[in-house]
Image: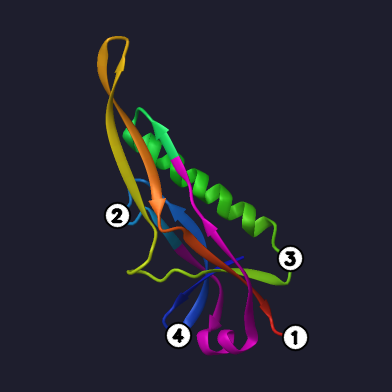
């Protein structure tokens, strides 16, 4: 299960990675589980950190950006699926400073004698996810 800190609570979330969104790399609260942030800090300890990145190249701008986001989501879900059942995954990046953003580079290429655009998408910094386990 994936969690994110919201003020005085730590809430379960699901990935919401959409190229058309203002913040492409986002999480949506599902309110399945809500933990008190202070209790979370006392009861859980970080046992690992994963830094996730993705990139993509293509000839169609929005498809290329969404491909990169789909790759990022696949990596995130792969990490979540590989967790020990006693562990949870927590978004370490806070909104604002240090939060991952998508970056686009565009260049002209010649395909069959015609000028075309080629898009490259990447993200920086990496999406940091902490693996937490209840203290013994």
Number of other residues with Cα within 10 Å of mark 4, as a class: few under 14, some 14 to 19, many 20 or more:
few
For mark 2, give the secondary structure. loop
Q: Which mark is residue 8?
A: 4
| Residue 62 in which image quadrant | top left
For mark 4, give the secondary structure. loop
For mark 3, give the secondary structure. loop
Mark 2 lies on residue: 22
Tell which circle, 4 or 3, labels the residue nearer the N-terminal end. 4
Which region of the structure is painted magenta? 28-55
Task: Kindly report the distance in space between the C-alpha atoms of the residues bearing marks 2 and 3.
Answer: 34 Å
For mark 1, give the secondary structure. loop
Q: In screen coordinates, is 3 left or right of 64?
A: right
Foreground of the two, 6 or 99: 99
Tell which circle, 1 or 2, labels the residue nearer the N-terminal end. 2
Q: Main secondary structure of the magenta part?
A: strand
- Examine the structure image and report whether residue 49 is included in the region drawn in magenta: yes
Mark 1 lies on residue: 136
Q: Which mark is residue 68?
A: none
Tell which circle, 3 or 1, labels the residue nearer the N-terminal end. 3
Foreground of the two, 13 or 108: 108
- Examine the structure image and report whether residue 62 is included in the region drawn in magenta: no
Q: Which mark is residue 84?
A: 3
Number of other residues with Cα within 10 Å of mark 2, as a class: few under 14, some 14 to 19, many 20 or more:
few
Q: Give residue 30's position: percent from left, percent from top.
A: 51, 66
Q: Is residue 103 above or below residue 14?
A: above
Q: Nearer the viewer, mark 2 or mark 3?
A: 3
Q: Give residue 101's position: percent from left, percent from top.
A: 36, 55
Tell which circle, 1 or 4, labels the residue nearer the N-terminal end. 4
Task: Kindly report the distance in space between the C-alpha atoms of the residues bearing marks 2 and 4.
Answer: 25 Å
Q: Nearer the viewer, mark 1 or mark 4?
A: 1
Q: What colouring style does the render use? A: rainbow
- Farthest top residue in view: 112
């Amino acid at each position: 299960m994936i969690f994110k800190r919201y003020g005085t609570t730590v809430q379960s979330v699901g990935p919401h990675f959409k190229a058309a969104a203002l913040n492409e790399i986002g999480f949506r609260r599902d309110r399945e589980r809500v933990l008190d942030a202070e209790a979370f800090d006392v009861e859980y300890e970080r046992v690992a950190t994963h830094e996730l990145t993705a990139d993509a190249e293509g000839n169609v701008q929005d498809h290329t950006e969404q491909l990169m986001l789909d790759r990022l989501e696949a990596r995130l879900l792969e990490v979540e699926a590989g967790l020990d059942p006693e562990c949870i995954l927590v978004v370490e990046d806070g909104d604002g400073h240090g939060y991952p953003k998508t970056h686009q580079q565009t260049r002209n290429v010649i395909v069959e004698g015609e000028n075309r655009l080629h898009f490259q998408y990447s993200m920086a910094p990496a999406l940091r996810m902490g693996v937490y386990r209840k203290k013994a």
